[in-house]
């Protein structure tokens, strides 16, 4: 507990408004930049939440619109196990299937989840022209995308804040080293190794 009190007191003495006469302008600028970056990082949290909410709303609206314009129809599988050229990505395989749009038969490659057997009926999504299309995203997929967008926003914002802080620290150090070098030179000492 004592160590924490000492740390808090030390941080308070390093604050930009401190009356410490040993603090230089560069020290005050650096501590002010730390305070500013801390406030920005705190503000990034609700902003990231707003980005996530906005992303979720946009994805949900897009999925709702897909459900309104597209429709689900039954399709009959025409082919067995897929060849390497028709193999899908992820958990799905692709197989040849046939479905009907207003009495007109259509055939094409569709993503199939599970066993591929000739004659098996699966439900697929088609667009208004009757072409096979991806199913609309689910609520869980939308939530996952929204959380990812919020985390990315917060991560990039935090990285930007840290880079600004590092740049200010580097400039303040260079300024302090130049000042120390001038003071060293003003003492009339023979110049040895440089502080720069």
Image (cartoon, helix red, strand yellow):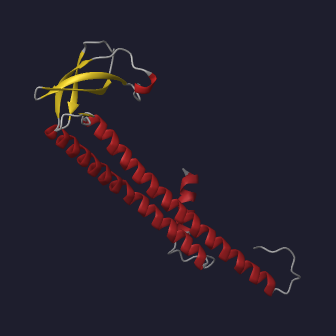
Q: Quadrant of residue 107?
A: top left
Q: Quadrant of residue 30?
A: bottom right
Q: Where is 40 relative to 185, above or below?
A: above
Count of numbered circles on the image: 0
Residue name at image x 37 percent, y 60 percent: 43
Q: Position of residue 75 (x, y in %)?
A: 21, 22
Q: Where is 98 relative to 34, above or below?
A: above
For the C terminus, which image quadrant?
bottom right
Q: Where is 123 relative to 14, above or below?
A: above
Taking the view exactly as shown, the residue that stands out farthest to the right is 190
Q: Position of residue 148 (x, y in %)?
A: 38, 44
Residue 15 in view of the camera: no
Residue 189 or 158: which is nearer the viewer? 158
Residue 50 or 58: which is nearer the viewer? 58
Q: Where is 95 relative to 11, above or below?
A: above
Q: Position of residue 150 (x, y in %)?
A: 36, 49
Taking the view exactly as shown, the residue that stands out farthest to the left is 102
Residue 177 in view of the camera: yes
Residue name at image x 41 percent, y 28 percent: 90
Residue 157 or 100: which is nearer the viewer? 100
Taking the view exactly as shown, the residue that stands out farthest to the front is 104
Q: Position of residue 163 (x, y in %)?
A: 54, 62
Residue name at image x 45 percent, y 55 percent: 156
Q: Quadrant of residue 68?
A: top left
Residue 188 or 160: which is nearer the viewer? 160
């Amino acid at each position: 507990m004592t160590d924490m009190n000492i740390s808090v007191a030390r941080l308070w003495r390093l604050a930009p408004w401190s009356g410490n006469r040993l603090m230089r302008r560069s020290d005050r600028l650096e501590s002010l930049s730390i305070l500013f970056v801390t406030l920005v990082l705190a503000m990034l949290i609700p902003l990231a939440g707003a980005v996530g909410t906005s992303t979720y709303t946009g994805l949900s609206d897009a999925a709702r619109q897909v459900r309104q314009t597209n429709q689900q129809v039954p399709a009959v599988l025409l082919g067995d196990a897929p060849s390497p050229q028709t193999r899908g990505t992820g958990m799905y395989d692709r197989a040849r299937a046939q479905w009907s749009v207003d009495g007109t038969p259509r055939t094409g490659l569709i993503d199939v989840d599970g066993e591929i057997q000739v004659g098996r009926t699966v439900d697929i999504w088609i667009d208004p022209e009757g072409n096979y299309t991806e199913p609309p995203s689910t609520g869980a997929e939308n939530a996952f995308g929204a959380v990812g967008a919020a985390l990315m926003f917060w991560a990039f914002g935090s990285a930007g804040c840290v880079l600004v802080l590092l740049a200010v620290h580097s400039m303040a150090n260079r300024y302090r080293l130049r000042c120390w070098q001038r003071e060293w030179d003003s003492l009339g000492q023979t110049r040895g190794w440089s502080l720069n």
